[in-house]
């Protein structure tokens, strides 16, 4: 089960990825985490990435693909993996396809989360999290802690907000998404790999839609 979760920031990909991890036992792969792990482990590609970052430059697509390739060769990816937030561009998508094909692998499905822009801005602008365990809450709806000011999961009373969780920043992030990443919707649709879920629905309903897709793989 090799999955890509596709959608704008705030669409709920991270939440659903965690639920897939818990139910199906496959790892969620973040390019940022993989990059840091490769650098810390001192692998050949990690050394290349470190040299680029130390020079104050952006890591190339070639290096990122090499890091993803290295990561999915590890034993915990034998039964599959989730790519969340990658690929971000058509160039990266082509490179990912070629890399998987070279390993005799292919994507099982690409799940797109559809959410209106106004809802995305509302979600992100009111978001905050527990500073200790990372549980996410929101100013509105049913997303408050059960006891005001106390984390439901760990009992901490310390919370934080990301400084970039503002309507202005979210609008800018959406513009980048529509310019660079949304073309992947058509790309994967043309390959017959795309399935869409209603990201506006309640979280459990979204999970049910996702599981319905996965059950048919």
Image (spheres, rainbow, N blue to C red):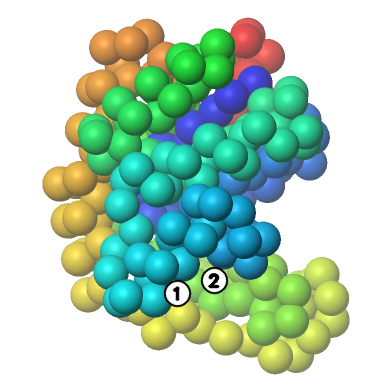
Q: Quadrant of residue 37?
A: bottom right
Disc on res. 138: 2
Please tell me whether mark 2 sits on a helix, a strand or a loop.
strand
Q: Position of residue 201 (x, y in %)?
A: 50, 40
Q: Position of residue 27 (x, y in %)?
A: 70, 41
Note whether 51 is above or below 38 in the view shown: below
Q: Position of residue 68 (x, y in %)?
A: 52, 41
Q: Work out how far the residue at label 1 is from the one at label 2, CA to CA, in angstroms.
A: 5 Å
Note whether 205 is above or below 51 in the view shown: above
Residue labelled with disc 1: 126
Determine whether, in the image, residue 29 is placed left or right of residue 107: right
Note whether 20 is above or below 188 in the view shown: below
Determine whether, in the image, residue 61 is placed left or right of residue 15: left
Q: Is residue 148 visible?
A: no
Quarter of the picture holding the N terminus: top right
Q: Quadrant of residue 21?
A: top right
Other-residue count near label 1 (Cα within 10 Å), few / some / many at <14 / 14–19 / ≥20: some
Q: Residue at x 44, y 60 (%)?
A: 49
Q: Residue at x 40, y 48 (%)?
A: 63
Disc on res. 110: none
Circle 1/circle 2 CB separation < 8 Å: yes
Other-residue count near label 2 (Cα within 10 Å), few / some / many at <14 / 14–19 / ≥20: some
Camera-nearest residue between 112 and 40: 40
Q: Position of residue 182 (x, y in %)?
A: 24, 38
- Answer with mark 1 or mark 2, whichever residue precedes in sequence: 1
């Amino acid at each position: 089960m090799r999955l890509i979760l596709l959608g704008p920031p705030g669409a709920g990909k991270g939440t659903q990825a965690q639920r897939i991890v818990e139910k199906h036992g496959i790892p969620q792969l973040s390019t940022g985490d993989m990059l840091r792990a490769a650098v810390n482990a001192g692998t050949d590609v990690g050394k290349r990435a470190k040299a680029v970052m130390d020079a104050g430059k952006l890591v190339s697509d070639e290096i990122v693909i090499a890091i993803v390739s290295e990561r999915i060769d590890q034993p915990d990816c034998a039964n599959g993996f989730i790519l969340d937030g990658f690929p971000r561009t058509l160039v990266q998508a082509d490179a990912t396809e070629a890399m998987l094909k070279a390993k005799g692998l292919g994507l099982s499905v690409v799940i797109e989360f559809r959410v209106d822009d106004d809802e995305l801005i509302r979600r992100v602008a009111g978001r905050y999290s527990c500073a200790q365990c990372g549980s996410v809450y929101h100013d509105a709806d049913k997303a408050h802690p059960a006891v005001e000011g106390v984390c439901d999961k760990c009992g901490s009373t310390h919370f934080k907000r990301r400084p970039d969780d503002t309507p202005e920043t979210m609008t800018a992030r959406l513009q980048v998404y529509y310019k660079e990443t949304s073309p992947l919707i058509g790309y994967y649709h043309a390959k017959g790999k795309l399935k869409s879920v209603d990201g506006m629905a309640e979280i459990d309903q979204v999970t049910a839609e996702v599981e319905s897709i996965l059950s048919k793989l």
